[in-house]
Every structure is written in structure tokens, then in C-alpha cells.
Image (cartoon, rainbow, N blue to C red):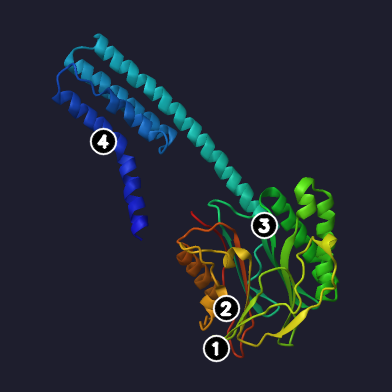
């Protein structure tokens, strides 16, 4: 609240500063001998307005500065002296410069706004928000970007209701930039198709492996050889009260019970990330764990587990969440993202994707939730 109030006061001060500079220039000119000039104050007014005001407002301040200088010269009856003409020429030059700066800044802001719209559209297309209720399960998701004004990177999640139950994937593509976004699109696209067609979760994982292998042949250099994606695939069959997991080198999901107990669902056998089949091939086997009513599954990327405090200590989600009770997936992710911000002091070096899946308890009402794609640092 204090920082927000300071920001509001600063904004108000900036809005009145050009007028204050012109008023100060007039007072200075009236109170000093004729050989003293207030042209720096009159010149500063339009320059201060240029980065923060509209073109019309900047022009009005510029005109006010010129009128003030001219009016004072007329008042002192020295309109044609070298000093007065130099002062007027200086202010006019700065006015033209201020108007040019204003135009450049407004054009840059328009281009930035357009880029943000394009990024948001790409985000919705590549990483769509899952529905709040899928196959009888409550769903909540968050995407926390480490870089301010960033929208999507290499972290991904997707949830889909299929003939085999609710299936989901949470993953983290190696690298940054457009290559990572392209790989995200490949993984999610392959998952959407395979989740509907493959009878086993292992089959879905193999389809993702092949999709990334095809993607790798299109790449050049280092990414073509070392590109990979850590991922965890999950399947919640209808009516069985269990969850099946295939983990390909990804942080282990957490199962939060209704009484505050917590289990880390580690894979029975470690496996390589997707896209590293050239280093070895092992059959994918799904591990089955209980998923009782009233409990919540938490999936996350390493942006959470590798978040650090001021002393460089990693954030431990299992330790921070054990013993706590949340009314639903939304409340869990709200508390978790807030806790991470406090732990890191508001700074993070990696994107963070979170997905919480809750199985309603007996008689538990449906909960509505909103899914936010959040830009850290805004």
C-alpha cells in the first residue's frame, strides 16, 4: 500500500511539474534584474511534459512557455535585445525538441501495446486456460513469468477430459525465446491428440517423444542435439480414486490431503526427459497412487523449487505446504504464489507454471475459480 501511495503522489507531482516550472520562471524573471534569465525553467517545462503527456498537452505546455517568455520580454520592454532574442530562440529550439521526443515516445508506446496484444493472443493460442471444472475435478492454474511484461516462455500445462479419464501434462522446455515457445506448441498439440487416442499413459508419453524428435530434425546447432523437455503426465480415471503418473525428469507432484498431510509422488524408476531418446530408451511405466476425495494434486515446474531467498536457499514447496489446509485448488495457488513472492523478495529468475487438481469430497459443493496468467514485476 505504501509503494502504491508513493506512486500516486509521484504521478500527481509529474503532472503539475511543467506548470510549476513555468510559474517559477515567471517569478524568477520578475524578481531579478534584467540580465538574469529564466530560460532554463521555461525550456525544462516542455521537456518534462514530453515523456509523460499526450501530444496535445505537450503542445499546450510548449505554447505556454513561449507565451511566458514573450510576455515577459514585452513587459520589460526589451523584445529586440540580443539577450531577449537569444532566450526566445533557446526556448523555441527546446520546444521543437520536446515535441519530437513526445512523438517518438508515443509511437514506441503504441508499438509496445501492439506487441503486448500479439503476445497475449499467442499465449491464449499456445497455452490456453483450462476450464475450472473438468471431468468432475476442480482445476486451477497459474503462469508466473519471471520477466516483467513477458507472457509465455518454456513452461506448459494442459488438461483434457478423455475416454480414459482426465489426463494432463505439465512440462518445462529447455531454453528460452521463440524456440521454447515453438516446442511448447509441439508438446501441447501432440498431447491433445495422443490423450484422446492412446489407451495408456505410457503411449501418450511415447507420442510426445516422437513429436519432439520430429521437431528436433528441424532445428540447427545446439538445440537440435541437446533440446529436451521435462514433463509429468497424469491420468485420473473415473470413479477409481487413484492417479497414474509418468514422470520424465520433472519435479515430483505433491498430494495434499484434506487433513494437511502431504505426500511427494516420486517415480518408482527415474527416467530421462522427453527428447533425449538418443541417450537411451526405457519403457515408460505409469505409477499408480491413491487420490482420495477432498485431496489436491499440485504440479509445478522448477521455477518454484529453484526460487531462492536472499541467502540463496531454495524454496521447498513440500516443507512450506505440509500441515496446511486449503479450501480448494484456487486458494492453494493463491497462497503458494504469495508465499513465493515473500520468500524471494518479489524477484525470480525463472518462469513458474502451477497446476492444482482437486477431487471434491463427499457433499463438497462445486467451487468456481479464475485462472490468472500473472507478469511478475508489473
**Residue that badge 4 annotates:** 20
Label 1 close to label 3 by CB (< 8 Å): no
Q: How far apart are marks 3 and 2 (CA)?
A: 30 Å
Q: Badge 4: how crowded within 10 Å, few (<14), some, or many (20+)?
A: some
**Residue that badge 1 annotates:** 259
Outermost residue toward the bottom in this view: 362
If you read the primary sequence from the N terminus, does the residue marked by circle 4 or circle 3 appear first? 4
Q: Splitting the image into 4 quarters, where does residue 132 fall?
A: bottom right
Closer to viewer: mark 4 or mark 2: 4
If you read the primary sequence from the N terminus, does the residue marked by circle 3 or circle 2 appear first? 3
**Residue that badge 2 annotates:** 367
Q: Splitting the image into 4 quarters, where does residue 198 fall?
A: bottom right
Q: Badge 3: how crowded within 10 Å, few (<14), some, or many (20+)?
A: many
Residue at 76%, 80% (x, y): give it: 287
Q: Splitting the image into 4 quarters, where does residue 71 fall?
A: top left
**Residue that badge 3 annotates:** 154
Residue 181 spot, x, y in % from top left:
70, 53
If you read the primary sequence from the N terminus, does the residue marked by circle 2 or circle 1 appear first? 1
If you read the primary sequence from the N terminus, does the residue marked by circle 4 or circle 2 appear first? 4
Closer to viewer: mark 3 or mark 2: 3
Closer to viewer: mark 1 or mark 4: 1
SS assignment at label 2:
loop
SS assignment at label 4:
helix
Label 4 close to label 2 by CB (< 8 Å): no
Q: Distance between the residues labelled 4 and 3?
A: 49 Å
Q: How far apart are marks 1 and 3 (CA)?
A: 34 Å
Q: Badge 2: how crowded within 10 Å, few (<14), some, or many (20+)?
A: some
Label 4 close to label 3 by CB (< 8 Å): no
Q: Badge 1: how crowded within 10 Å, few (<14), some, or many (20+)?
A: few
Q: Distance between the residues labelled 4 and 2?
A: 54 Å
Q: Distance between the residues labelled 1 and 4?
A: 62 Å
Amino acid at each position: 500500500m505504501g509503494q502504491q501511495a508513493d506512486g500516486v503522489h509521484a504521478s500527481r507531482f509529474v503532472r503539475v511539474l511543467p506548470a510549476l516550472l513555468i510559474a517559477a520562471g515567471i517569478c524568477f524573471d520578475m524578481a531579478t534584474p534584467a540580465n538574469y534569465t529564466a530560460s532554463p525553467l521555461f525550456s525544462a517545462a516542455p521537456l518534462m511534459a514530453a515523456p509523460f503527456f499526450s501530444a496535445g498537452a505537450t503542445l499546450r505546455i510548449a505554447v505556454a512557455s513561449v507565451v511566458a517568455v514573450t510576455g515577459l520580454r514585452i513587459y520589460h520592454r526589451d523584445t529586440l535585445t540580443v539577450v531577449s532574442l537569444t532566450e526566445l530562440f533557446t526556448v523555441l529550439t527546446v520546444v521543437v525538441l520536446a515535441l519530437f521526443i513526445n512523438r517518438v515516445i508515443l509511437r514506441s508506446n503504441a508499438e509496445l501495446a501492439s506487441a503486448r496484444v500479439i503476445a497475449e493472443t499467442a499465449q491464449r493460442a499456445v497455452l490456453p486456460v483450462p476450464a475450472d471444472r473438468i471431468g468432475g475435478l476442480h482445476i486451477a492454474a497459474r503462469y508466473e513469468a519471471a520477466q516483467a511484461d513477458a507472457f509465455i516462455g518454456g513452461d506448459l500445462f494442459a488438461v483434457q477430459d478423455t475416454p480414459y479419464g482426465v489426463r494432463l501434462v505439465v512440462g518445462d522446455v529447455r531454453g528460452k525465446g521463440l524456440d521454447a515457445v515453438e516446442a511448447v506448441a509441439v508438446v501441447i498439440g501432440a498431447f491433445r491428440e495422443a490423450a484422446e487416442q492412446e489407451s495408456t499413459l505410457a503411449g501418450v508419453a511415447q507420442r510426445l517423444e516422437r513429436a519432439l524428435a520430429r521437431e528436433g530434425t528441424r532445428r540447427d546447432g545446439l538445440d537440435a542435439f541437446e533440446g529436451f523437455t521435462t514433463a509429468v503426465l497424469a491420468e485420473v480415471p473415473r470413479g477409481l480414486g487413484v492417479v497414474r503418473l509418468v514422470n520424465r525428469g520433472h519435479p515430483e507432484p505433491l498430494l495434499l490431503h484434506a487433513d494437511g498431510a502431504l505426500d511427494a509422488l516420486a517415480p518408482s524408476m527415474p527416467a530421462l526427459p522427453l527428447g533425449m531418446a538418443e541417450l537411451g530408451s526405457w519403457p515408460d511405466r505409469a505409477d499408480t497412487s491413491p487420490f482420495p476425495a477432498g485431496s489436491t494434486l499440485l504440479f509445478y515446474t522448477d521455477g518454484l523449487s529453484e526460487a531462492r531467498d536472499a541467502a540463496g536457499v531454495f524454496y521447498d514447496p513440500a516443507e512450506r505446504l505440509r500441515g496446511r489446509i486449503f479450501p480448494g485448488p484456487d486458494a492453494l495457488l493463491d497462497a503458494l504464489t504469495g508465499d513465493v513472492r515473500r520468500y524471494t523478495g518479489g524477484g525470480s529468475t525463472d518462469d513458474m507454471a502451477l497446476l492444482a487438481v482437486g477431487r471434491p469430497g463427499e457433499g463438497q459443493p462445486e467451487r468456481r475459480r479464475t485462472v490468472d496468467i500473472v507478469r511478475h514485476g508489473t
